[in-house]
């Protein structure tokens, strides 16, 4: 049986001893060779998560049970996308929501969207149900500017979704997305513009005061000469 660590111990969710905890370095060492873009040893069932995610917390004990039951038939792992050491892998697979469960097999990865139960996870990974799922080619490793560009695009997508959710919760979900983005942008931009305007005005007032002081200096010096 797996050993479950409580969330209070090191801030981690439950973790089975059959489920490997990966970062970018371990992912390249154990899962996928960045040079050949191929799996190193067998298929992998990987859960991408964030510790603060409520859905991830609810899935954690189920994932442990899945690892305990099927860990000797398939490689099982987790990747914490909040960790800087693992964020590049999350961007590589374009993970934009948590939890995301992927099956890496052959030259493809398959997206799991089924029930969150041990039986459903097992049927997907081992009974061929993944063949009906959405699949993509294994992505190559990204570095440098390409990685930053991908992460920035991911941030923009998440921000856009957050804006839509916010307007939906306050009862304006029927507005066109462009209008939502415009209002949200104005909410942030207007205070910045006002702040810049105030700073500029304060600077002008300061210059005027200094100029007035300079104008007074010659008159005082003339009085000194007359004395």
Image (cartoon, rainbow, N blue to C red):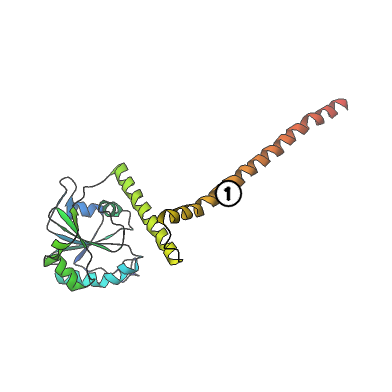
* Position of the N terminus by quadrant: bottom left
* Position of the C terminus by quadrant: top right
Image coordinates of residue 180 in percent, x first then y, are 44, 56
The residue labelled by disc 1 is 194
Image coordinates of residue 82 in percent, x first then y, are 33, 58
Number of residues whose C-alpha sits closer than 10 Å to that of mark 1, classed few (under 14), some (14–19) or many (20 or more): few
Q: Nearer the viewer, residue 7 or 48?
A: 48
Q: Is residue 125 visible?
A: yes
Image coordinates of residue 23 in percent, x first then y, are 26, 56
Residue under the point 47% across and 55% down: 184
Q: Nearer the viewer, residue 71 or 123?
A: 123
Q: Is residue 1 visible?
A: no
* Residue 32 left/right relative to 176: left
Residue under the point 12% across and 66% down: 126
Vertically, is 190 above or below 69?
A: above
Residue 98 found in image quarter: bottom left
Residue under the point 21% across and 50% down: 139
Residue under the point 17% across and 55% down: 31
Residue placed farthest to the top in the image? Answer: 225
SS for tag 1?
helix
Residue 18 found in image quarter: bottom left
Vertically, is 64 above or below 218?
A: below
* Residue 202 left/right relative to 54: right
Image coordinates of residue 22 in percent, x first then y, are 24, 58
Q: Nearer the viewer, residue 155 or 20?
A: 155
Vertically, is 153 above or below 20?
A: above
């Amino acid at each position: 049986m797996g050993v479950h660590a409580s969330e209070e111990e090191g801030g981690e969710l439950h973790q089975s001893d059959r489920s490997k905890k990966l970062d970018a370095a371990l992912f390249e060492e154990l899962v996928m060779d960045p040079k050949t873009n191929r799996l190193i040893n067998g298929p992998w069932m990987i859960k991408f998560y964030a510790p603060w995610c409520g859905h991830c917390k609810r899935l954690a004990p189920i994932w442990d049970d899945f690892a305990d039951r099927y860990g000797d038939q398939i490689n099982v792992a987790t990747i914490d996308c909040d960790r800087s050491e693992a964020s590049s892998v999350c961007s590589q697979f374009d993970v934009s929501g948590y939890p995301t469960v992927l099956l890496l097999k052959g030259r493809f990865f398959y997206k799991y969207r089924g029930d969150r139960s041990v039986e459903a996870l097992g049927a997907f990974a081992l009974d061929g149900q993944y063949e009906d799922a959405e699949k993509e080619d294994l992505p190559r490793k990204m570095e440098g500017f390409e990685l930053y560009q991908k992460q920035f695009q991911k941030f923009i997508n998440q921000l856009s979704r957050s804006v839509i959710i916010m307007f939906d919760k306050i009862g304006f979900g029927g507005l066109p997305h462009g209008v939502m983005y415009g209002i949200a942008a104005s909410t942030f931009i207007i205070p910045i513009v006002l702040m810049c305007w105030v700073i500029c005005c304060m600077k002008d007032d300061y210059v005027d005061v200094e100029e007035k002081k300079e104008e007074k200096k010659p008159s005082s010096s003339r009085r000194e000469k007359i004395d």
